[in-house]
Amino acid sequence: MLQKKKFLIGGIIIFLAIGYLAYTGFQSSATYYYTINELLAQKNTLQSSNVRVTGQVAGDSIQTETATLTMKFTIVNGPASLPVIYKGAVPDTFKAGIDVVVEGRLESDGVFRASNILTKCPSKYEPAESS
């Protein structure tokens, strides 16, 4: 009987640990996507928060510094725009005109410091035209 109690208590502890890990994992990945207008409207309350912002990479805004792996670009959504600075490896599909989701923090100077870039894949891939 003592053996059954130990087994039951051990099972409950393992179940609670798995539940806690699942809950914290879900909370960290459940970040809302803001549009640029929503972010700028709530910039005072969201300034120190880790957020995701969606937009389209502006055509001629990409500047890269290969020595420091730093990229500066602007994302736009209608008339609204947001300057972004990202340091790290860039996805292969990143280019001007593509829809992206940047994750990071809005600084007090109005620049978004991205810690991650996600490119939205087109719904249909088309082969490159041969010349």
Image (tube, rainbow, N blue to C red):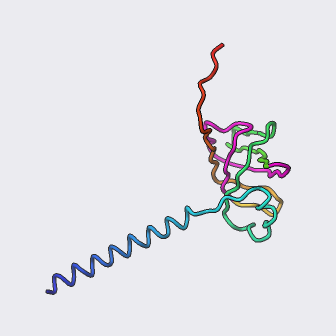
Quick one: quadrant of the N terminus? bottom left
Residue at 16 percent of width and 82 percent of height: 3
Residue at 81 percent of width and 36 percent of height: 60
Span highlighted in magenta in the image: 78-104
The vertical placement of 50 against 69, above or below, is below
Residue at 79 percent of width and 66 percent of height: 43
Where in the figure is residue 110, as x and y percent of width and height?
82, 58
| Residue at the outermost right position | 79
| Residue at the outermost front position | 124
The vertical placement of 23 against 113, above or below, is below
Taking depth in this image into account, of 108 and 79 the one nearest to the observer is 79
In this rendering, position of residue 124 left or right of residue 4: right
The vertical placement of 17 against 77, above or below, is below
In this rendering, position of residue 14 left or right of residue 22: left
Q: Is residue 66 magenta?
A: no
Where in the figure is residue 79, as x and y percent of width and height?
85, 49
In this rendering, position of residue 80 left or right of residue 3: right
Where in the figure is residue 29, as x and y percent of width and height?
55, 61
Where in the figure is residue 75, as x and y percent of width and height?
77, 47
